[in-house]
Image (cartoon, rainbow, N blue to C red):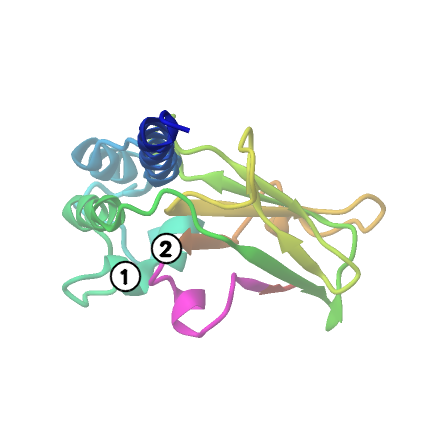
Amino acid sequence: MTHRPECLVVLMAAVAVLSTQGCSRSASRVRPPSINAVAAGAAAMEQYDTNRDGRVDATELANAPGLKAALANLDRNNDKCVDADEVAERIRIWQESRVGQTSVTTTVTFRGQPLAGATVVFEPEACLGPHVRPAVGTTTEDGVAPMKTEGADAPGVAPGLYLVRITKDGANLPAKYNIETVLGVEVARDGDYALNDQNGPLFAL
């Protein structure tokens, strides 16, 4: 009986420590990918600025699906092109958001109907470097694929610019949707799909 107050104090202290540790782990569990923003901007120009005029113009964007998908957010000066500084600035915005992973569901239709059993791959634009990993999902009967980063414990995708490749065994989908894809997406809290109150992009093949 005489030891109860002391035991209670010890117990409360232990609970407080565990609670603090638990909150700390939760807050730091997923962080934005480590991307060198300036290097990424330069790499994007090296890859896609084929005429070496310092920007990726409308013609060149046709070969840059990830950049093209994010044009509205990348193009700060409204010239319909993307330059190295704009890529770098967009990456800084992702990093400042402190969001390391966001829930994304991709919807796929083929000839107007939901495409079930398709594999959807988000492949990071090469300019982002090695720390942004691909994400994969398989469409349900409704043509909806919850996306999950490769190697992650839970569904979700890191902020970034991605090429999108869609395949399905036996469907013989055109190469422009997979091997030579023209599809892209920007994963971000203020990406196109998010601004339209959608949980992810829709691809009508």
Whether residue 145 is visible to the viewer of this picture, yes or no, is yes
Residue occupied by mark 1: 73
Q: Nearer the viewer, residue 113 or 97?
A: 97
> Which mark is first along the chain, 1 or 2?
1
Q: Nearer the viewer, residue 43 or 115?
A: 115
Q: Secondary structure at mark 1?
A: helix
Give the amino acid type for the residue marked by disc 1 in the picture: Asn
Whether residue 63 is visible to the viewer of this picture, yes or no, is no
Q: Is residue 82 above or below residue 205?
A: above
Q: Main secondary structure of the magenta part?
A: loop
Residue occupied by mark 2: 188
Q: CA distance from mark 2 to mark 1?
A: 10 Å
Residue 137 magenta-drawn?
Answer: no
Report which quarter residue 13 is drawn in.
top left
| Neighbour tally class for label 1: few under 14, some 14-19, many 20 plus, Cα within 10 Å | some
Q: Secondary structure at mark 2?
A: loop
Residue 200 magenta-drawn?
Answer: yes
Give the amino acid type for the residue marked by disc 2 in the picture: Ala
Q: Which residues are magenta?
A: 188-202
Asked if the residues shown at circle 2 and circle 1 are in contact, with their CB atoms under 8 angstroms apart, the answer is yes
Quick one: quadrant of the N terminus?
Answer: top left
